[in-house]
Image (spheres, helix red, strand yellow):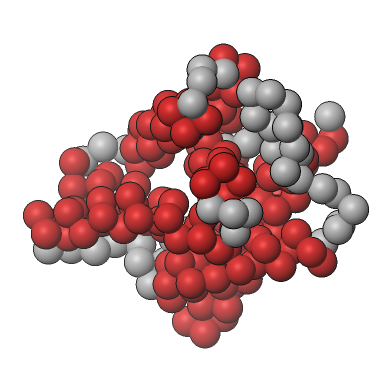
Amino acid sequence: MDRLDLRPSFERFWKRIDNFSQHGSAVWTASAVNYSHWLGVNVGIILFIIGFLNTVTNQFLIRYWDWPRFVGEICYVCFFSYFVNIFANFFTAVGIGGLPIVVRAILSCLGIVFFCTAISLYQRANILMHPNDDTTNILRFMYLKKSAVAAQLVDFVPPIVAMAISFAVTKNLYAVNIGTIFSILCNGLIIQTADRLVWPTLKHNFKTLNNTKN
């Protein structure tokens, strides 16, 4: 159970460093921020809607309805925003937002490196995941010949298109900066590298309906 609790929290911690450094959010988060500004809706609600849509999409991608997977991912999304708020308050208290621009840029990229490493670990454990991380796992092992790089790039298409639509309407682009570009270019490569170098004996536990492992 420690593994179930700590890895997702570790990921949230570093993802929040990336967001709070003010040098761009991870791509899906950036799209949520833009729609929050456009629609005037709390970003947490947007993130929940995105998570719900991811969860439903995953059921279609695996080609059968997996109730434990569906319920687990919805629960994860509900708790995700709670932990993000805890870490946001912590980073406000320590003053990360007031650090020099170069330091914040480094922290943004460092946050991405560490949360991608955390994604590598808990994707391999495959106990309970955020639906978007499950989406990339499904794409990787069922559709894209086990390539984490390709899976991440395909997964980024919807939020990038969503931000393009938002920008076309509002003429504003929020939460996109160095960290966002670094995330687009490097997420898959970092995850794939972490698979090889960080706890390499922890193998992928990806399961299909027939309980096959890849």
Q: Residue furthest right?
A: 201
Asked where in the image residue 170 lies, by quadrant, the reply is bottom left
Using the image as rendered, state which of residue 74 and residue 85 is in the foreground. Answer: 74
Q: Is residue 24 left or right of residue 126?
A: left
Relative to 35, does residue 76 appear above or below in the rendering? above
Left or right: 20, with 31 as reference point = right
Viewer-proximal residue among 182 and 19: 182
Q: Position of residue 46 (x, y in %)?
A: 34, 37
* Whole-percent x, y for residue 51 in the image: 44, 34
* Residue positioned 73% across, 32% down in the render: 212
Q: Decide: is 18 above or below 66.
A: below
As drawn, 152 above or below 125:
below
Work out which residue is located at the far top of the displayed protein and give it. Answer: 67
Residue visible at 48% across and 72% down in the picture: 185
What is the quadrant of the C terminus in the image? top right
Looking at the image, residue 35 sits to the left or right of residue 52; the answer is: left
Asked if one can make out residue 126 in the rendered structure from this viewpoint, the answer is: no
Is 213 or 19 nearer to us in this picture?
Answer: 213
Q: Give residue 149's quadrant in the image.
A: bottom right
Query: Which residue: 18% across, 48% down?
Result: 38
Number of marks present in the image shown? 0
Is 195 situated above or below 123? below
Image position, residue 14 (x, y; %): 63, 57
Residue 198 pos. (x, y %) = 82, 62
Which quadrant is home to the N terminus?
A: top right
Camera sees residue 102: yes
Q: Which residue is at a point 53% across and 53% down the rendered structure image?
A: 144
